Amino acid sequence: MTRTRIKICGITNLDDAKLAIDAGADAIGLVFYEKSPRYVAINTADYIIRNSAPFINFVGLFVDADESYIKKVLDRVAIDTLQFHGQESEQACAIYNRPYIKAIRMTDDIELSEQCEKYSSANALLLDTFVEGVPGGTGLSFNWDLIPDDLNKPVILAGGLDETNVKDAISQVRPFAVDVSGGVEREKGIKDPVKIKKFISETMNA
């Protein structure tokens, strides 16, 4: 059976990046959204990536960002994958010629098959909890029954995951990957070593 990949998002410093990587994370998420408590400046992001181990996928998260700002980040930071968490169109996501993930905020009436068609060039859909006015990092889970098992794109499951529920989430959804931020924090923007290790262990043993 294919192993569920693990993305630790909202990394703000090198120590937390190294902790996540050493514990077995496949991807590190860096938030380029100034309103987020997990926002990371361009210089800091560059420093984190330059001083981290190889073979890790670094994901840059943007929320309805200006094209000029995204290009500025890409010129200075070795981002592997883009993640769009706002109302971006497919065209706006695809113009950078980089692999990208489109985050979908889940509501009861959403049709994920339509989202797959709408963002046909996306490498995956990241499914997160809808909270009015909050684009991500809510710490709340959503109804996993809303996810059909026949989507034609990989699913990255986010929203309220932690070491207590990630096994159940994987058992039910069978996602390509899980994405966690607040569920492994000591405080917003600062990770908890014990929680990271436990979350990754639970995922690997799911």
Image (tube, helix red, strand yellow):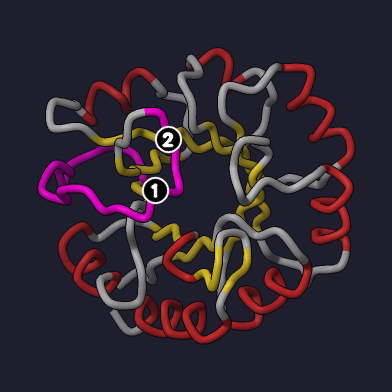
> Could you say where residue 21 lies in the image, as x and y percent from the top left?
65, 74
Residue under the point 13% across and 26% down: 109
Check disc 1 and report the residue beneath it.
Answer: 138
Locate residue 50: give its quadrant: bottom right
Q: Which mark is residue 134?
A: 2
Q: Is residue 35 left or right of residue 113?
A: right
| Magenta stretch holds residue 115 | no
Q: Residue at x 65, y 82 (%)?
A: 22
Q: Quarter of the image containing the N terminus?
A: bottom left
Which residue is at the front of the view, 13 or 74? 13
Residue 34 spot, x, y in % from top left: 67, 36
Dominant SS of magenta comes to loop
Within 10 Å of disc 2 (Cα), the crowding (few <14, some 14-19, many 20+) is few
Query: Is residue 15 depicted above or below 176 in this figure?
Result: below
Please report the residue visible at 75 percent of the width from the left and 74 percent of the height from the top: 15
From the viewer's side, name the closer residue of 16 and 167. Answer: 16
Q: What residue span does the magenta drawing correspond to?
A: 133-154
Q: Secondary structure at mark 2?
A: loop
On screen, residue 122 versus residue 44, left or right, reads left
Asked whether 148 falls inside the magenta stretch, the response is: yes
Q: Are marks 1 and 2 in contact (CB under 8 Å)?
A: yes
Residue 120 location, quadrant:
top left
